[in-house]
Image (spheres, helix red, strand yellow):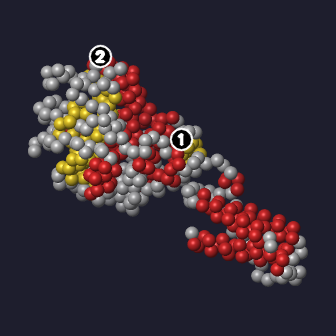
């Protein structure tokens, strides 16, 4: 199989506060696919970024308490987020905006880390790995609940109740990966893989043997030091982790995954969960829910036929539903 | 909910007293009062306290109690109104009859779109020999 493999066309850029990767099976079509990807990322950022004062979701928050008609893309993102909440019983809930901010994730993540480093330096040179972080401690804020949104998808009308803050971050990023891959495959007619911060969406005919994917805690380390290398033919693959997007706040280590029921980080059990599903969105929903679920996550994933790789805080690995058992370096 | 029902019951009793007072002179007046009382409740305002003593022209005829049934109907409609209001944000403005008439999108649970289950992949991932160069990384960002 190795001899028949040809390297796909590859394009990378920075977007949505993370790195974006584009692979196409026909390198000559890379430019066209890249154009599609740039357009999709710009649109999802313009619509869903909670850090941009001019984004549609920021304007939506300003209009809380009134019924507004949202754009088709925000409607799709809302549909995705509310479906995630419904099918996980609220484990993945878009109304965690205030909870995430209370944990200290109140600006672009690069700025969160920069501020943390400054605080650490002021307190004696410690950064995110030390005891830095002098921000006042806020009580965790349980999510108000996704069911409080009044949403009419046919009319694209939303009434966001006052006091409810949305964070579409995780599902919007995965949705963007699916959309960009599907659109680029339609435009080019070739196989496309789009990776956004390690969440992968695939469309079109894959390369022979499937897309080869390196899995690790942090996607930036994956190619150099993969925990496992697998191949995936279609759908999506997502990894949620408590180690990559983490910071210190109020003297405690925090990360971006919030249990909507408490408004706090879930009890530590899984540090990384990777899931393969029919789409990147579904994989992302499942991997996030698994981190929140804790000990029952393997059964939850297996009962849904979702292949997954779960790694505990101490490095023990659990596989479900046909995820390959081989581990590199084991 | 129990406290809410007790409050409604107290309001109804006050209404009964007022209806009794008015119907002593005019059954039509009682009907008008009941309608006005219902409008006040629908607007979400607490009705003024019932008079502590009957005016001099008050009557105690039991036949005058009959319009109370219409007050009971109003109470049921008020209960439904408050149930619907429970899904709107408490931090929002007080709901007036005019505000209640504004069309509000259906509650989300009735309007969710998309598959109701997470979709499993068509094929499970396969292991690839470690020596093969991976094309894409997956991990948290």
Whole-Å distance between the Cαs marked 1 and 2? Answer: 39 Å
The residue carrying mark 1 is A153
Disc tally is 2
Which residue shows up at 24% across the image and 29% down it? A210
First in sequence, mark 1 or 2: give its number.
Answer: 2
Picture coordinates of residue B130, whole percent (x, y):
13, 35
Neighbourhood count class around disc 2 (C-alpha, 10 Å): few under 14, some 14–19, many 20 upward: few
Which residue shows up at 45% across the image and 40% down it? B114
Q: Chain of mark 1?
A: A
Q: Please state which of the two labelled residues, at mark 1 or mark 2, is closer to the viewer.
A: 1
Q: Is residue A238 above or below residue A316?
A: above
Quarter of the figure that contains the C terminus of chain A: top left
Q: Is residue B73 visible?
A: yes
Q: In the displayed structure, does residue B70 sit left or right of residue B87?
A: right
Which residue shows up at 50% across the image and 50% down it? B109
Which residue shows up at 49% across the image and 53% down it? A147
Q: Which numbered tag is attached to residue A28?
A: 2
Q: Is residue B12 above or below residue A135?
A: below
Q: Is residue A138 visible?
A: no
Picture coordinates of residue A263, whole percent (x, y):
39, 58
Q: Secondary structure at mark 1?
A: loop
Q: Is residue A256 above or below residue A282?
A: below
Q: Secondary structure at mark 2?
A: helix
């Amino acid at each position: 199989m190795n001899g028949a493999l040809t390297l796909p066309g590859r394009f990378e850029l920075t977007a949505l506060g993370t790195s974006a990767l584009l692979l196409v099976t026909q390198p000559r079509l890379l430019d066209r696919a890249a154009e599609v990807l740039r357009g999709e990322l710009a649109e999802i950022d313009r619509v869903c970024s909670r850090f941009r004062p001019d984004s549609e979701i920021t304007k939506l928050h300003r209009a809380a308490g009134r019924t507004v008609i949202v754009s088709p893309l925000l409607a799709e993102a809302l549909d995705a987020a509310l479906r995630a909440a419904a099918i996980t019983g609220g484990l993945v809930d878009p109304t965690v905006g205030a909870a995430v901010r209370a944990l200290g994730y109140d600006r672009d993540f690069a700025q969160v880390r920069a501020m943390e480093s400054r605080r650490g330096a002021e307190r004696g040179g410690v950064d995110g790995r030390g005891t830095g972080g002098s921000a006042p401690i806020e009580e965790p804020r349980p999510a108000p609940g996704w069911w409080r949104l009044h949403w009419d998808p046919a009319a694209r009308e939303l009434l966001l109740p006052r006091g409810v803050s949305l964070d579409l971050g995780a599902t919007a990023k995965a949705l963007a990966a699916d959309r960009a891959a599907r659109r680029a495959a339609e435009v080019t007619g070739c196989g496309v893989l789009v990776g956004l911060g390690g969440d992968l969406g695939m469309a079109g005919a894959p390369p022979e043997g499937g897309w080869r994917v390196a899995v690790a805690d942090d996607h930036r380390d994956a190619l150099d030091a993969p925990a496992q290398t697998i191949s995936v033919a279609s759908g999506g693959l997502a990894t949620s982790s408590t180690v990559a997007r983490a910071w210190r706040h109020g003297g405690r280590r925090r990360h971006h995954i919030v249990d909507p029921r408490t408004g706090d980080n879930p009890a530590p059990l899984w540090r990384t969960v990777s899931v393969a599903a029919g789409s990147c969105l579904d994989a992302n929903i499942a991997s996030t829910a698994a981190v929140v679920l804790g000990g029952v996550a393997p059964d939850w994933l297996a009962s849904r036929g979702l292949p997954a790789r779960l790694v505990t805080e101490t490095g023990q690995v659990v596989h479900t539903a046909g995820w390959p058992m081989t581990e590199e370096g084991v | 909910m129990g406290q809410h029902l007790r409050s409604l019951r107290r309001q109804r009793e006050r209404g009964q007293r007022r209806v009794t007072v008015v119907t002593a002179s005019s059954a039509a007046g009682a009907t008008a009062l009941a309608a006005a009382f219902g409008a006040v409740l629908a607007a979400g305002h607490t009705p003024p306290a019932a008079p502590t003593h009957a005016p001099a022209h008050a009557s105690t005829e039991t036949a005058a109690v009959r319009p109370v049934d219409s007050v009971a109907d109003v109470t049921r409609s008020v209960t439904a109104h408050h149930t619907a209001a429970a899904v709107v944000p408490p931090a929002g403005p007080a709901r007036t009859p005019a505000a209640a008439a504004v069309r509000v999108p259906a509650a989300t649970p009735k309007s969710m779109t998309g598959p109701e289950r997470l979709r499993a992949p068509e094929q499970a991932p396969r292991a690839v020999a470690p020596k093969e160069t991976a094309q894409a990384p997956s991990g948290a960002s």
